Image (cartoon, helix red, strand yellow):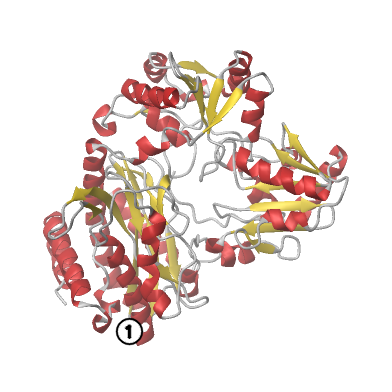
Amino acid sequence: MFQSFDDLSDPSCGAPHAALLRAELSRRGLDGFLVPRADAHQGEYVPPHDCRLQWLTGFGGSAGVAAVLADEAAIFVDGRYTIQVREQVDQDVFPAQHLITEPVSDWLSTRLKSGQKLGIDAMLHTVREVRRLKKICQEAGAELVLLEDNPVDNVWKDRPQPPVGQVSLYPVELAGKASMDKIAEIQSAISDKKADACVLTQPDSIAWLFNIRGSDVSHTPLPLSFATVPAKGKPSLYIDSRKLSNSVRDALSDLTNLAEPGDFVGGLKTLGERGSKVMIDPALAGIGIADAITDSGGTLVEEQDPVLLPKAVKNDAELKGARAAHIRDAIAYVNFLCWFDEEAPKGELDEIGVAEKLEEFRRETGVLKDISFDTISGAGPNGAICHYRVSRASNLKIPLGKPYLIDSGAQYEDGTTDITRTLAVGDVSAEMKRHYTLVLKGHIAISTAKFPEGTSGAQLDTLARIDLWKAGLDFDHGTGHGVGAYLGVHEGPQRIAKTGATPLKPGMILSNEPGYYPAGEYGIRLENLEIVTEPEDIPGGDRPMLGFETITLVPMDLRLVDVALLTSSERNWLNRYHEKVREVIGPGVGAKQRIWLENATKEI
């Protein structure tokens, strides 16, 4: 399922859809309802069947929530989408609020009245979130009503069908560990927490555990499903049987008890009736899951999904695959950059054409499974929209004299890639070079960081921003996210961000992507993927330090670098990085592209 450039906004959403929903709420005796951008799995990528927020408001971003009351409504998004939400959503119907600084909880606390009933879909709101909502309602004298069905579904007349993408087995030579061994590892973690079983709601956790991949959502090979894992005995996998071929069904039957998704709640109730202590992740599991267990007699053990950390720490086979995927991807990218430098100065390229061309070069590898997310192809002011999604309606020609931002990635069976480059098109100003170089300095600071065991991403995040801060500048997104092994391009719990609390461990893969976005002008972001390396002694030091291995091997655009702003060590990093790019990628490209590469990576 590759990228579509259709405009996903629906002219009938906004006021007409809000009116339909309000009528349904009135029929049910509800005074309000929350519509999150979420499905029952709480994943980043939501199938069309569950895109209720987009149906209601027109907003197509990956995070947000709408609050609908009888006489007022609002939509809440984070800093990545402050521009996009105003372009896609009717602000007279759903005024935009900042999800972090103006959260929905604050908005509700000043509007809910005594005796009112606020409804939520119990499967779409996590245990942790519902606790906050209950407190708000109690303080207002209102009631939080947990619904087993969703009012939006009753009025969404042309709602798509649930996905039934085929499931495939993931080879153990790429996974690096057999599923039986992974199950034993997770069962040991469950026992350590004094639990009898664990509920898994995240499809990527389930895919990793059972060494399977699927095709239910865009750009990420996930089989939408639920699982329960007992401390002893066979797990249960709740997955639509239409997704399983006979061979896949036979292989999975050796590992797990197979059941339909409709049986999932019944399975939870059975655990409860046995008096089981059941581990759930309160940040990921819907309150409907927790209630099914406790209402039938079970006890909750609230812990982080036990698969998250083992999945994040890649084994040798996964790291080998990631390195191979990045070399293959870099060869395709260098071919693309050579083409771009020939064509862009002519002034005829547009955002869609460039994104399609990059995808074409990746397809020519012969092993591309999918792109890993919709390419962010941002010309001029569109580049200033952090998570811009180009459509045929928004498509701009790439202007001369401004930076052009392209953030893209690929899914290969041996690894997932994610890279952002900002490219000069024609002559760019000294101010643009200054901004680019400040971002580059932050990128280098992360790449060269040394840090002791136990260091979290939050402790490193400042390194990427300090030179921007000194100039009175900043960016409104995290510096880096985790990346999966032929799984999600965004993976937790590891991240480099102000809120990145998880200690970084050797084998984790993270992005390194500081940026700067002057609104209405252009965007700058530089992104490589990094592997956290094993602790090493430093001459003269008294303790070993972790660091990063950069696995993305694509030139930075030297035409945008103000060399005078770089320290000697920063220049040395850039020269050594480009030297490695030449050595590793040069043999894989043609003669014409090799000449381009030599020039693009010349020493400064």
Q: Which of these two is toward me, 417 or 208?
A: 208
User: Which residue: 63% across, 44% down?
Assistant: 129
The quarter of the image holding the C terminus is bottom left
Q: Which residue lies furthest to the bottom in this view?
A: 430
Q: What residue type is labelled 1?
A: Asp
Q: Which of these two is toward me, 545 or 173?
A: 545
Dot 1 surroundings within 10 Å: few (below 14), some, or many (20 or more)? few
The quarter of the image holding the N terminus is top left
Q: Which residue lies furthest to the front in this view?
A: 542
Q: Can residue 135 be seen in this view?
A: yes
Q: Can residue 126 be seen in this view?
A: no
Q: From what the image shows, is residue 67 above or below residue 554? A: above
Q: From what the image shows, is residue 343 above or below residue 490? A: below
Residue 322, by quadrant, is top left
From the viewer's perspective, tell me whether residue 502 is left or right of residue 285.
Answer: left
Residue 169, by quadrant, is top left
Give how far across and how far down residue 566 sits, in percent. Answer: 25, 78
Give how far across and how far down residue 136 sits, in percent. Answer: 74, 49
Q: From what the image shows, is residue 110 above or below residue 507? A: below
Q: From what the image shows, is residue 297 above or below residue 22? A: above
Tell me the residue that label 1 is attached to. 427
User: Which residue: 72% across, 33% down?
Assistant: 149
